[in-house]
Amino acid sequence: MDDFLVTLAMICYMAAIIGIGFYYAKKSHESTDNYFLGGRSLGPYVTAMSAEASDMSGWLLMGLPGVAYFTGITDAFWTALGLGVGTYINWLIVAKRLRVYSHVAGDSITIPDFFSNRFREKNKTIMGIAAIFILIFFTVYASSCFVTVGKLFHALFGIDYIYMMIAGAIFVIVYTFVGGFLAESVSDFMQAIVMIVSLVAVFTVGVNAAGGMGKVTENLRQFPGFLEFIGIAQPVMVDGVQQVADGLPVFSDKIGDYGFLTILSTLSWGLGYFGMPQVLLRFMAIRDPKEIKVSRRAATVWVFISLLAAVFIGMIGRALYPTALLTVSDSESIFIHMASDLMPPFLAGVMMAGILAATISSSDSYLLIASSAVAKNLYQGIFKKDAPDKQVMKVSKITLLLISLVAMILAVDDQSVIFQIVSFAWAGFGATFGPLMLFSLFWKNATKEGAIAGMLTGGIMVFVWKLLLKPMGGVFGIYELLPAFVLSSLAIVIVSNITKKDPKVQADYDKAIKELQEV
């Protein structure tokens, strides 16, 4: 009966999501503008909630609590703080400028469109490079979502992870196929509500079950480094499994070093927001730039509450179930463990729907943006400029299927760690597009050549730092986003200063600033 009620709650939720997709299907398929950007018709609250829901993904309910559960508050807290501050600053300085400038720059409907139009390029080099990086990193991102849904269904129903991952992926693909951007954004609004309610509810029942935050703190003090802000707990591992002694998890007495440079690199998660296509598209899609202030407030409140609840769920989970989850991968199921154990079955199912909500809201964004990069920016933008809307949408859907297939292959390993997958893709977008977005919006003298140099430097350096330099440790052990972001910025400035400025591009910049002042 318990499994039936959990399943019933999730089926009801999934039916509601599919219903939204079909409701908006006709309008979404009227044109590529509607399918990829919703016709710039989003209201302030839908803009805010869909931006944050598509951004956070299942990482918020599984990856972040898992980090806090396994190694204590340090990594999770500084990451959450960086993301919270980054969210606010992005809405404050980027949102309105991008909404206005994207309209001035050829009424752009994708991020590669905007960059290409911003620099008035004829050979579409910027557009092509941007589309390729979007395809690469969003495929990785989509795989993290499929891992999330696979872990969720496996934990609930005990069926093999691989079958559950494939089933979840198919559901997401069908939904994205039907609805497009408008359906995705409206359903993301609902999913953002489900996510924050789920996080707050599990946090509340967890605190109550643990006897209050004072009792939680008392229990966690016995684990060296678990409550440190400038040190990190070191689980004693054998073959990837944390050891247990006298009924308690074993941590090394030597607390891991977490100095200023590490804190700075963890806070740099916030830099990623300046380059996140799924968030930036919402800025471009809001119906009225004057409503962005309302969106900013709603988004910031949602993010800070959700992030804090997620971190505390991991901490409370370790106090309640100290030896239940002894691998890094398993620790990401602490939210599921708490919801299943502490709540009535139907409500637990609603909480699980929160994870499903987070996964769907992100993966549909990733798949839609990646397929639009191929269909709209590569196929129509470069190879067949006279392609009609129907043909572009057909190519988009074929691309969506191919991307999904690759993402499922990447998600086959049930020991994949969601936090690690997301951190790499986040760094990729943050370093590839973040500096260029800021310089495009705030620096009149940025040139096409500088834009190309910045994108290539940032995107390539993420791979170089992650795969070649980071394993060396020491100063190279920092999060790859920070050095890649800095080097990308330097490349834009240096190359722009030694290349010729285009008067027409500068005139567009002046026009955008003038329109911005009139809003």
Image (cartoon, rainbow, N blue to C red):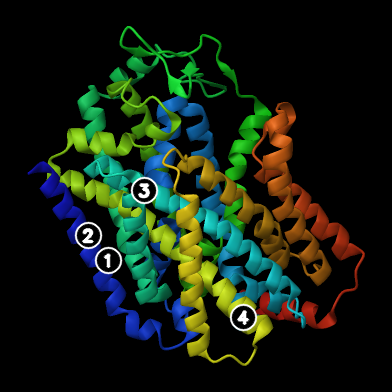
Q: Nearer the viewer, mark 2 or mark 3?
A: 3
> If you read the primary sequence from the N terminus, does the residue marked by circle 2 or circle 3 appear first?
2
Q: Are marks 1 and 2 in contact (CB under 8 Å)?
A: yes
What residue did someone put label 1 on? 17
> If you read the primary sequence from the N terminus, does the residue marked by circle 4 or circle 1 appear first?
1
- At mark 4, the secondary structure is helix
Distance between the alpha carbons at the discs numbered 2 and 3 = 23 Å
Distance between the alpha carbons at the discs numbered 4 and 1 = 30 Å
- At mark 1, the secondary structure is helix
The N terminus appears in which quarter of the rendering?
A: top left
- Identify the amino acid type marked 3: Ile
Who's the residue at 68% across and 41% down the image? Answer: 467
Q: Nearer the viewer, mark 4 or mark 1?
A: 4
Who's the residue at 16% across and 46% down the image? Answer: 347
What residue did someone put label 4 on? 379
Q: Are marks 4 and 3 in contact (CB under 8 Å)?
A: no
- Identify the amino acid type marked 2: Tyr
What residue did someone put label 3 on? 162
Relative to 450, say whether 344 is above or below.
Answer: above
50 with respect to 8 (left or right): right
What residue did someone put label 2 on? 13
Distance between the alpha carbons at the discs numbered 1 and 3 = 24 Å
Distance between the alpha carbons at the discs numbered 2 and 4 = 36 Å
Image coords of residue 59 (percent x, y): 43, 46
